[in-house]
Image (spheres, rainbow, N blue to C red):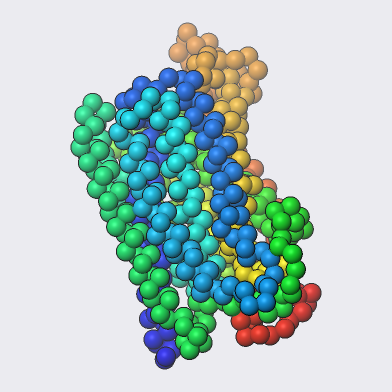
Amino acid sequence: ISSNDQKCLFMYFSVLYGSLALFTSILHNVFLLYYVETFVSVYKIDKISFWVGETVFLIWNSLNDPLFGWLSDRSFLSSPQAGSQITNPEVVLRRLKALSRNGPLFAMSFLAFWVAWARPGLQFLLCLCLYDGFLTMVDLHHSALLADLAVSANDRTRLNFHCSVFSALGSFSVFLSYSFWDKEDFYFFRLFCVALAAFSILGFFVVSRLLQQRFHKELRPKQDEALKELSVGPAPFTHPDRPVTIGQYIKQLSKHRNFMWFVSMNLVQVFHCHFNNNFFPLFLEHLLSDNISASTGSILLGISYIAPHLNNLYFLTLCQRYGVYQVIRWLFMLKLGLSVVMVLAGADHIYLLCIFIASNRVFTEGTCKLLKLVISDLVDEDFVVNRRQQAASALLFGMVALLTKPGQTFAPLIGTWLLCVYTGYDIFEREPVKDSLVSVPDIASGSGTPPLRLGCFYMLVFVPITCALLQLAAWSRFTLHGRKLQGIKNLRQGAQHGHLIDVKAI
């Protein structure tokens, strides 16, 4: 097979792989926007049932990533026994079969939100857990394929590029949903959700089957060499040993320094992303509402929603030229620089404030979308250093999620505490408290707004500054880039050719 044929084949795989992100995003974006309002305003769920459901969901959401990752990849952790080696094509086919099963089930669980079929509290709990369980299975296997389909940085970047394109297309389901959303008449919105789910089910089924057929056909023994960028064989330097237990695996990860530094940085990143999501409406209301029209505010909201996907296309081209590590480092420095400029400019420069609020969310979300590439590199390092039979891609993605998802919980808790500290304003009590950094003027005089506006401005600028400083400190200790990263990739690619290489050389 010629070089051009290989490139065309990889492009075919990349487009199909990226399209799987479309079938997830068209549903998940609508879910995030409407599920709370549906249960609160339409189904009239009571407050206790709502918080019980959210608490159980928080626990389940944190635990199911490593649980499903372990169930998926535990057979890859042990060294191969005689005659029982699992090849990388078989691993990829396993993941594609899992996507063909769990993708349609994920779409069906999405539909369960929009029809009342049980008591609101019970339905809320069951729907959240079912939906998140199938979403986790889809996301884990899709993310793991990024590490399994390609090893070279350029090929992984191209795969991620197509994911960003299709994720951006999936974001348009949010704009369409506004035409159908009506709390008083749910019929047309339900039809809209059924159409989205049917499209997603068909897409998952067809695309995963196409990938299975094509991958099975092209990765026969006679053609392995033609697709060497898509195939990484079993590690020849492993030796028979007992299966690795979950305790041993956790101990191995605890000694994986790059993994620990990455998790530290990513925990802050998850916190910052969700802080922006939670408080974006608050910043629009108290910093800009008196100076911009409602249509301008909605445009800012729309830009902040879809621009990260489009912006990521440019970031990925930079990654191909300079490397993922350097691009992420620049984004942290940019976040720090823009925040410092905003501090110096003050809260009265409205247009600068609009640009900062939008760009802060866009660049932060853009950074999040590059981190899958780094996790894929960590999969390579874990494969080589621990002499795996196969790369445990889904399990490593699951462990990263377990250790970083607490940032989702910290964001609203720390944010509301900071708001109270800076302004003396408790959003739950709607009353000022005494212990605040900003003096609270007499509310009767009508002068309570400036401190609240100033407190929101402090939150807006000092949270990114703090996050950027912490992330730059952790990221400077991350060493899996440059020559070391290339050495790891050479070792993993060399494994398929039977080269016995000393791991300690890295």
Q: Is residue 476 left or right of residue 30?
A: right
Which residue sits at x=44%, y=45%?
Answer: 358
Q: Position of residue 292 (x, y in %)?
A: 35, 35
Q: Nearer the viewer, residue 25 or 314?
A: 25
Q: Nearer the viewer, residue 87 or 370?
A: 87
- Height in image: 230 above or below 402? below
Q: Position of residue 372 (x, y in %)?
A: 54, 60
Q: Position of residue 481 (x, y in %)?
A: 66, 69
Q: Nearer the viewer, residue 228 or 296?
A: 228
In this rendering, does residue 457 appear at all? no
Quarter containing the N terminus: bottom left
Badge count: 0
Q: Is residue 252 left or right of residue 446?
A: right
Quarter containing the C terminus: bottom right
Q: Is residue 255 left or right of residue 64?
A: right
Q: Residue furthest top?
A: 444
Q: Nearer the viewer, residue 371 or 288?
A: 371
Q: Residue furthest bottom?
A: 2
Question: In which quadrant of the rendered view does residue 412 lie?
Answer: top right
Q: Position of residue 392 (x, y in %)?
A: 61, 63
Which residue sits at x=38%, y=76%?
Answer: 214
Which residue sits at x=66%, y=85%?
Answer: 498
In this rendering, does residue 13 appear at all? yes
